[in-house]
Image (cartoon, rainbow, N blue to C red):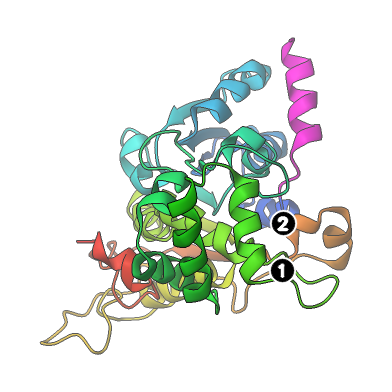
Amino acid sequence: MTPEAALAAAHANHIPVLCDEVVAAIAPKDGDLIVDGTFGAGGYTRRLLEAADCRVIGIDRDPDALELARQWAPLYNGRLELVQGVFGELDTLTGGRVPDAVVLDIGVSSMQIDQAERGFSFMRDGALDMRMGQSGTSASDIVNSAGVEELADILFQYGEERRSRAIAQAIVAACKAAPIETTLRLAEVIEAVAPRKKPGQPHPATRTFQALRIFVNDELGELVRGLAAAERALCAPGGKLAVVTFHSLEDRVVKRFFKSRSEATGAGVSRHSPGPVETAAPSLRTLTRKSITPSDAEIAANPRARSSALRVAERTENPAHAYEPRGLGLPGLALKGER
Protein backbone atom coordinates (compact mmCIF):
# COMPACT_ATOMS: atom_id res chain seq x y z
CA MET A 1 0.00 0.00 0.00
CA THR A 2 1.33 3.43 -0.88
CA PRO A 3 1.66 6.09 1.83
CA GLU A 4 -1.13 8.05 0.15
CA ALA A 5 -3.47 5.04 0.16
CA ALA A 6 -2.61 4.27 3.79
CA LEU A 7 -3.38 7.87 4.75
CA ALA A 8 -6.71 7.78 2.93
CA ALA A 9 -7.61 4.54 4.73
CA ALA A 10 -6.68 6.08 8.09
CA HIS A 11 -8.93 9.07 7.40
CA ALA A 12 -11.80 6.80 6.32
CA ASN A 13 -11.55 4.39 9.24
CA HIS A 14 -11.26 6.83 12.14
CA ILE A 15 -13.07 10.04 13.08
CA PRO A 16 -11.50 11.74 16.12
CA VAL A 17 -14.06 13.33 18.43
CA LEU A 18 -14.01 17.03 19.30
CA CYS A 19 -11.08 17.41 16.92
CA ASP A 20 -11.83 21.02 15.94
CA GLU A 21 -12.09 21.94 19.61
CA VAL A 22 -8.84 20.16 20.50
CA VAL A 23 -6.92 21.88 17.70
CA ALA A 24 -8.41 25.26 18.68
CA ALA A 25 -7.42 24.72 22.31
CA ILE A 26 -3.86 23.72 21.44
CA ALA A 27 -3.52 26.42 18.73
CA PRO A 28 -0.34 24.87 17.27
CA LYS A 29 2.31 27.23 15.88
CA ASP A 30 5.21 26.64 13.51
CA GLY A 31 8.07 25.02 15.41
CA ASP A 32 5.93 23.68 18.26
CA LEU A 33 6.51 20.22 19.71
CA ILE A 34 3.29 18.41 20.63
CA VAL A 35 2.88 15.05 22.35
CA ASP A 36 -0.10 12.93 21.31
CA GLY A 37 0.02 10.58 24.27
CA THR A 38 -2.79 8.32 23.03
CA PHE A 39 -1.99 8.19 19.33
CA GLY A 40 -4.43 5.44 18.26
CA ALA A 41 -5.25 5.91 14.59
CA GLY A 42 -3.56 9.32 14.57
CA GLY A 43 -6.62 11.49 13.99
CA TYR A 44 -5.57 14.35 16.28
CA THR A 45 -1.96 14.11 15.15
CA ARG A 46 -2.83 14.53 11.48
CA ARG A 47 -4.97 17.59 12.16
CA LEU A 48 -2.25 19.17 14.29
CA LEU A 49 0.43 18.53 11.66
CA GLU A 50 -1.83 20.05 9.01
CA ALA A 51 -2.61 23.12 11.16
CA ALA A 52 1.00 24.29 11.49
CA ASP A 53 4.58 23.39 10.66
CA CYS A 54 4.89 21.68 14.03
CA ARG A 55 6.26 18.33 15.18
CA VAL A 56 4.35 15.56 16.98
CA ILE A 57 5.55 12.68 19.13
CA GLY A 58 2.86 9.99 18.87
CA ILE A 59 2.81 7.52 21.77
CA ASP A 60 0.75 4.33 21.88
CA ARG A 61 0.98 1.04 23.72
CA ASP A 62 -0.58 -0.85 20.78
CA PRO A 63 2.06 -2.04 18.29
CA ASP A 64 -0.59 -2.52 15.60
CA ALA A 65 -1.56 1.16 15.74
CA LEU A 66 2.03 2.27 15.27
CA GLU A 67 2.64 -0.20 12.45
CA LEU A 68 -0.31 1.20 10.50
CA ALA A 69 0.88 4.76 11.12
CA ARG A 70 4.36 3.99 9.82
CA GLN A 71 2.79 3.42 6.40
CA TRP A 72 1.66 7.06 6.08
CA ALA A 73 4.04 8.88 8.46
CA PRO A 74 6.62 9.64 5.68
CA LEU A 75 4.09 12.02 4.10
CA TYR A 76 4.77 14.44 6.97
CA ASN A 77 8.47 14.75 6.14
CA GLY A 78 9.96 13.73 9.46
CA ARG A 79 7.63 15.85 11.59
CA LEU A 80 6.00 12.74 13.14
CA GLU A 81 7.91 10.54 15.59
CA LEU A 82 6.25 7.30 16.70
CA VAL A 83 7.04 5.80 20.11
CA GLN A 84 5.66 2.61 21.67
CA GLY A 85 4.83 2.97 25.34
CA VAL A 86 2.18 4.01 27.85
CA PHE A 87 1.24 7.66 28.19
CA GLY A 88 1.76 7.42 31.94
CA GLU A 89 5.48 7.58 31.08
CA LEU A 90 5.27 10.29 28.43
CA ASP A 91 7.63 12.61 30.29
CA THR A 92 10.43 10.05 29.93
CA LEU A 93 9.41 8.86 26.44
CA THR A 94 9.97 12.38 25.09
CA GLY A 95 13.68 12.03 25.83
CA GLY A 96 13.92 15.18 27.92
CA ARG A 97 12.40 17.44 25.28
CA VAL A 98 9.90 19.98 26.56
CA PRO A 99 6.62 19.91 24.61
CA ASP A 100 4.45 22.94 23.97
CA ALA A 101 1.29 20.86 24.35
CA VAL A 102 0.05 17.40 25.30
CA VAL A 103 -3.12 15.78 23.95
CA LEU A 104 -4.73 12.77 25.64
CA ASP A 105 -7.76 10.90 24.29
CA ILE A 106 -8.70 8.44 27.02
CA GLY A 107 -10.14 4.99 26.47
CA VAL A 108 -10.20 2.46 23.66
CA SER A 109 -9.76 3.63 20.07
CA SER A 110 -12.43 3.03 17.44
CA MET A 111 -9.83 1.07 15.48
CA GLN A 112 -9.51 -1.42 18.34
CA ILE A 113 -13.28 -1.64 18.82
CA ASP A 114 -13.79 -2.44 15.15
CA GLN A 115 -11.35 -5.37 15.21
CA ALA A 116 -13.34 -8.39 16.37
CA GLU A 117 -10.19 -10.31 17.25
CA ARG A 118 -9.25 -7.70 19.87
CA GLY A 119 -12.35 -8.59 21.90
CA PHE A 120 -13.40 -5.08 22.96
CA SER A 121 -16.97 -5.22 21.67
CA PHE A 122 -19.93 -7.60 21.84
CA MET A 123 -21.22 -6.26 18.51
CA ARG A 124 -19.17 -8.94 16.74
CA ASP A 125 -17.80 -12.25 17.96
CA GLY A 126 -14.14 -12.59 18.85
CA ALA A 127 -11.74 -13.78 21.50
CA LEU A 128 -12.43 -12.16 24.89
CA ASP A 129 -9.13 -10.27 25.03
CA MET A 130 -9.37 -6.45 25.53
CA ARG A 131 -5.62 -5.90 26.02
CA MET A 132 -4.57 -2.61 24.43
CA GLY A 133 -0.90 -3.53 24.57
CA GLN A 134 -1.52 -7.15 23.52
CA SER A 135 0.30 -8.56 26.55
CA GLY A 136 -0.48 -9.43 30.15
CA THR A 137 -3.75 -10.61 31.69
CA SER A 138 -6.71 -10.72 29.30
CA ALA A 139 -10.42 -10.22 30.00
CA SER A 140 -10.91 -13.96 29.53
CA ASP A 141 -8.31 -14.65 32.23
CA ILE A 142 -10.20 -12.41 34.66
CA VAL A 143 -13.66 -13.75 33.84
CA ASN A 144 -12.60 -17.37 34.19
CA SER A 145 -10.55 -17.02 37.37
CA ALA A 146 -12.22 -14.35 39.52
CA GLY A 147 -14.70 -15.21 42.24
CA VAL A 148 -18.09 -13.58 42.65
CA GLU A 149 -16.89 -10.93 45.12
CA GLU A 150 -13.90 -9.81 43.03
CA LEU A 151 -15.87 -9.81 39.79
CA ALA A 152 -18.78 -7.89 41.33
CA ASP A 153 -16.34 -5.26 42.64
CA ILE A 154 -14.82 -4.85 39.17
CA LEU A 155 -18.23 -4.45 37.52
CA PHE A 156 -19.51 -2.01 40.13
CA GLN A 157 -16.40 0.15 40.55
CA TYR A 158 -15.35 0.36 36.89
CA GLY A 159 -18.69 -0.02 35.15
CA GLU A 160 -21.06 1.48 37.74
CA GLU A 161 -23.16 -1.62 37.08
CA ARG A 162 -26.09 -1.77 39.51
CA ARG A 163 -26.64 -5.48 38.91
CA SER A 164 -22.98 -6.30 39.45
CA ARG A 165 -23.53 -9.12 41.93
CA ALA A 166 -26.21 -10.90 39.89
CA ILE A 167 -24.10 -10.64 36.74
CA ALA A 168 -20.99 -11.83 38.59
CA GLN A 169 -22.88 -14.83 39.96
CA ALA A 170 -24.14 -15.70 36.47
CA ILE A 171 -20.65 -15.43 34.97
CA VAL A 172 -19.04 -17.60 37.65
CA ALA A 173 -21.80 -20.21 37.28
CA ALA A 174 -21.41 -20.25 33.49
CA CYS A 175 -17.64 -20.67 33.78
CA LYS A 176 -18.14 -23.82 35.83
CA ALA A 177 -19.93 -25.38 32.86
CA ALA A 178 -17.37 -24.20 30.29
CA PRO A 179 -14.78 -21.39 30.09
CA ILE A 180 -16.04 -18.11 28.67
CA GLU A 181 -13.63 -17.36 25.86
CA THR A 182 -15.56 -15.23 23.37
CA THR A 183 -17.30 -11.86 23.47
CA LEU A 184 -20.68 -13.16 22.32
CA ARG A 185 -20.78 -15.92 24.93
CA LEU A 186 -20.12 -13.41 27.69
CA ALA A 187 -22.78 -11.08 26.30
CA GLU A 188 -25.30 -13.95 26.19
CA VAL A 189 -24.60 -14.88 29.81
CA ILE A 190 -25.17 -11.28 30.89
CA GLU A 191 -28.30 -10.84 28.79
CA ALA A 192 -29.84 -13.94 30.34
CA VAL A 193 -29.67 -12.43 33.83
CA ALA A 194 -30.12 -8.76 32.93
CA PRO A 195 -32.40 -8.57 29.88
CA ARG A 196 -33.22 -5.29 28.15
CA LYS A 197 -36.31 -3.66 29.63
CA LYS A 198 -37.24 -1.28 26.80
CA PRO A 199 -36.41 -0.99 23.09
CA GLY A 200 -33.58 1.42 22.45
CA GLN A 201 -31.89 0.91 25.82
CA PRO A 202 -28.17 0.01 25.83
CA HIS A 203 -27.32 -3.67 25.68
CA PRO A 204 -27.15 -5.07 29.25
CA ALA A 205 -23.54 -6.12 28.66
CA THR A 206 -22.35 -2.57 27.94
CA ARG A 207 -21.25 -1.67 31.46
CA THR A 208 -19.68 -5.08 32.08
CA PHE A 209 -17.55 -4.83 28.94
CA GLN A 210 -16.52 -1.29 29.92
CA ALA A 211 -15.57 -2.42 33.41
CA LEU A 212 -13.49 -5.37 32.22
CA ARG A 213 -11.68 -3.25 29.64
CA ILE A 214 -10.83 -0.55 32.17
CA PHE A 215 -9.65 -3.14 34.71
CA VAL A 216 -7.57 -5.17 32.24
CA ASN A 217 -5.73 -2.06 31.00
CA ASP A 218 -5.66 -0.20 34.35
CA GLU A 219 -7.09 2.74 32.44
CA LEU A 220 -7.95 4.94 35.41
CA GLY A 221 -4.59 4.37 37.09
CA GLU A 222 -2.89 5.09 33.79
CA LEU A 223 -4.98 8.26 33.41
CA VAL A 224 -3.73 9.67 36.73
CA ARG A 225 -0.14 8.71 35.90
CA GLY A 226 -0.56 10.27 32.45
CA LEU A 227 -1.91 13.55 33.83
CA ALA A 228 0.99 13.75 36.29
CA ALA A 229 3.49 12.89 33.55
CA ALA A 230 2.04 15.62 31.33
CA GLU A 231 2.28 18.09 34.21
CA ARG A 232 5.98 17.23 34.60
CA ALA A 233 6.72 17.27 30.87
CA LEU A 234 5.04 20.65 30.34
CA CYS A 235 7.58 22.42 32.52
CA ALA A 236 7.53 25.71 30.57
CA PRO A 237 4.81 28.30 31.33
CA GLY A 238 2.03 28.37 28.75
CA GLY A 239 2.16 24.69 27.82
CA LYS A 240 -1.31 23.31 27.05
CA LEU A 241 -2.86 20.05 28.25
CA ALA A 242 -6.03 18.91 26.43
CA VAL A 243 -7.82 15.77 27.66
CA VAL A 244 -10.79 14.06 26.01
CA THR A 245 -12.76 11.60 28.14
CA PHE A 246 -15.66 9.29 27.36
CA HIS A 247 -17.43 8.53 30.63
CA SER A 248 -18.04 10.01 34.05
CA LEU A 249 -15.29 8.05 35.82
CA GLU A 250 -12.62 9.50 33.54
CA ASP A 251 -14.04 13.02 33.50
CA ARG A 252 -14.24 13.10 37.30
CA VAL A 253 -10.54 12.23 37.59
CA VAL A 254 -9.52 14.91 35.09
CA LYS A 255 -11.74 17.54 36.71
CA ARG A 256 -10.33 16.85 40.16
CA PHE A 257 -6.76 16.73 38.89
CA PHE A 258 -7.11 20.10 37.19
CA LYS A 259 -8.76 21.57 40.30
CA SER A 260 -6.04 20.21 42.58
CA ARG A 261 -3.33 21.75 40.40
CA SER A 262 -5.13 25.05 39.78
CA GLU A 263 -5.34 25.98 43.46
CA ALA A 264 -2.82 26.22 46.28
CA THR A 265 -3.43 22.73 47.65
CA GLY A 266 -1.85 19.62 49.03
CA ALA A 267 -1.19 18.23 45.54
CA GLY A 268 -4.43 16.29 45.33
CA VAL A 269 -4.31 14.76 48.81
CA SER A 270 -7.75 14.09 50.24
CA ARG A 271 -8.86 16.45 53.02
CA HIS A 272 -9.36 13.31 55.11
CA SER A 273 -5.65 12.44 54.98
CA PRO A 274 -4.08 12.48 58.47
CA GLY A 275 -1.35 14.92 59.45
CA PRO A 276 -0.21 18.23 57.99
CA VAL A 277 -0.14 18.69 54.23
CA GLU A 278 2.51 20.78 52.51
CA THR A 279 0.92 23.45 50.31
CA ALA A 280 1.94 23.52 46.65
CA ALA A 281 1.56 26.55 44.39
CA PRO A 282 -0.75 26.17 41.36
CA SER A 283 0.99 24.33 38.52
CA LEU A 284 -1.96 24.56 36.13
CA ARG A 285 -4.50 27.16 35.10
CA THR A 286 -7.82 25.60 34.10
CA LEU A 287 -9.04 27.06 30.80
CA THR A 288 -12.40 25.27 30.64
CA ARG A 289 -14.75 26.13 33.50
CA LYS A 290 -17.06 23.41 32.21
CA SER A 291 -16.17 20.55 29.93
CA ILE A 292 -16.57 21.10 26.20
CA THR A 293 -19.01 18.62 24.66
CA PRO A 294 -19.75 17.74 21.02
CA SER A 295 -22.37 19.54 18.98
CA ASP A 296 -25.56 17.85 17.84
CA ALA A 297 -24.15 17.83 14.32
CA GLU A 298 -21.01 15.98 15.41
CA ILE A 299 -23.03 13.42 17.37
CA ALA A 300 -25.25 12.83 14.34
CA ALA A 301 -22.20 12.31 12.11
CA ASN A 302 -20.27 10.27 14.68
CA PRO A 303 -22.44 8.64 17.40
CA ARG A 304 -19.32 7.54 19.29
CA ALA A 305 -18.78 11.20 20.20
CA ARG A 306 -21.97 11.28 22.27
CA SER A 307 -20.40 10.86 25.71
CA SER A 308 -17.12 12.68 25.03
CA ALA A 309 -15.93 15.71 26.98
CA LEU A 310 -12.88 17.96 26.62
CA ARG A 311 -11.07 19.77 29.42
CA VAL A 312 -8.07 22.04 28.87
CA ALA A 313 -5.46 23.51 31.22
CA GLU A 314 -2.36 25.65 30.83
CA ARG A 315 0.94 25.22 32.65
CA THR A 316 2.09 27.92 35.07
CA GLU A 317 5.63 28.79 36.08
CA ASN A 318 5.34 26.81 39.34
CA PRO A 319 6.87 23.35 39.81
CA ALA A 320 4.83 20.20 39.24
CA HIS A 321 3.09 18.86 42.32
CA ALA A 322 4.17 15.66 44.02
CA TYR A 323 2.47 12.58 42.59
CA GLU A 324 -0.53 11.69 44.76
CA PRO A 325 -3.42 9.63 43.33
CA ARG A 326 -5.64 9.90 46.41
CA GLY A 327 -8.48 12.37 46.35
CA LEU A 328 -8.87 12.27 42.56
CA GLY A 329 -11.87 9.96 42.42
CA LEU A 330 -10.14 6.68 41.68
CA PRO A 331 -12.10 3.57 42.70
CA GLY A 332 -10.66 1.56 45.55
CA LEU A 333 -9.48 -1.20 43.21
CA ALA A 334 -7.49 1.31 41.16
CA LEU A 335 -5.80 2.70 44.27
CA LYS A 336 -4.56 -0.72 45.38
CA GLY A 337 -1.72 -0.73 42.87
CA GLU A 338 -0.77 2.91 43.39
CA ARG A 339 2.09 4.12 45.49
Q: Is residue 256 left or right of residue 335?
A: right
Residue 63 is tagged as none
The quadrant of the rendering that contains the C terminus is bottom left
Distance between the alpha carbons at the discs numbered 2 and 1: 8 Å
Neighbours of disc 2 within 10 Å: few (<14), some (14-19), many (20+): many
Identify residue type, mark 2. Leu
Identify residue type, mark 1. Thr
Residue 338, image quadrant: bottom left
Q: Is residue 320 above or below residue 53?
A: below
Q: Is residue 204 visible to us here?
A: yes
- Looking at the picture, how far across and down is residue 32, in whole percent? 54, 39
**Do tag 2 and tag 1 residues touch (Cβ < 8 Å)?**
yes
- Looking at the picture, how far across and down is residue 64, in whole percent? 55, 26
- Looking at the picture, how far across and down is residue 189, in whole percent? 60, 59
Residue sitting at x 88%, y 60%: 300
Residue 73, image quadrant: top right
Which of 73 and 56 lies nearest the eye of the viewer? 73
Disc 2 is placed on an element classified as loop
- Looking at the picture, how far across and down is residue 91, in whole percent? 34, 44
Span colored in magenta:
1-16
Q: Is residue 286 visible to us here?
A: no
Residue sitting at x 59%, y 73%: 288
Q: Is residue 178 above or below residue 199?
A: above
Question: To which residue does mark 2 refer?
Answer: 18
Question: To which residue does mark 1 refer?
Answer: 293
Neighbours of disc 1 within 10 Å: few (<14), some (14-19), many (20+): some
Which of 137 and 217 lies nearest the eye of the viewer? 137
Residue sitting at x 38%, y 71%: 330
